[in-house]
Amino acid sequence: MSLRPAEPGDAADLARILGDWIAEVPWLPKLHSREEDLAFLRELLQTHEVTVWGRPATGFLARRGEEITALHVAAEARDAGVGSALMAAAKAASPILRLWVFQVNTPARRFYARQGFVETEHGDGSGNEEGLPDLALNWTRHD
């Protein structure tokens, strides 16, 4: 398996990864249908730099400049280094990275802390459609 740029034909796999994660997380409101997830991913592929792992894709990271807007790994590929590989590619492409994570998402917060991200801002949920408190995290390359 390896990293590669996303292609338009990856949209269905990426939508499945996202939709399956949303379905399995009990604290996350279910706001969109699977069809809406697919439409969202098709748009994301046109507006962001998206890197995927594998063919078919089992993980993806979407980035717009310094901002990481999505990082998701399929359940069957978790704890196998996929997230770390995707993050390493993003770090190689940008000396500064920023992202938001839900405060309740403890596994993601641990992952980002291991990746060297630090908390810079607390949100009350008014800035995301889920209405959940979140955290801004930043990473800076130290050469």
Image (tube, rainbow, N blue to C red):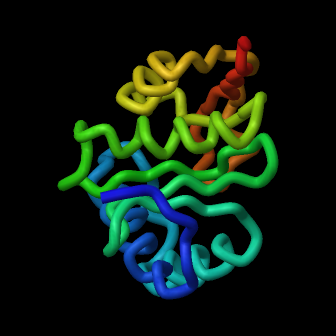
Give me the residue at 73% from left, 13% from top: 143
- Front-most of 136 and 78? 78
Observer-nearest residue: 126 or 91? 91
Residue 2 x/y as whole percent: 38, 57
Measured as percent of width and height from the top left, residue 51 is found at 55, 59
Residue that appears at 41% across and 21% down: 110
Q: Is residue 120 above or below residue 93?
A: above
Quadrant where the image shows the N terminus: bottom left
- As drawn, the residue found furthest toward the left would be 76
Look at 32% across and 48% down and name the residue there: 25
Name above or below for residue 105 compared with residue 116: below
Residue at position x 72%, y 33% in the image: 97
Q: Quadrant of residue 121?
A: top right
Work out whether residue 66 can be spotted.
yes
Left or right of residue 60, residue 135 in this image: right
In the image: residue 3, left or right of residue 117 = left
Residue 22 in sight here: no
Residue 54's x, y, as percent? 35, 64
Q: Of all residues shown, which one is farthest toward the right?
A: 65
The residue nearer to you, when weighing 63 against 99, is 63
Please give the count of numbered marks on the rendered protein: 0
Residue 94 is situated, as x and y percent measured from the top left of the image, at: 75, 37
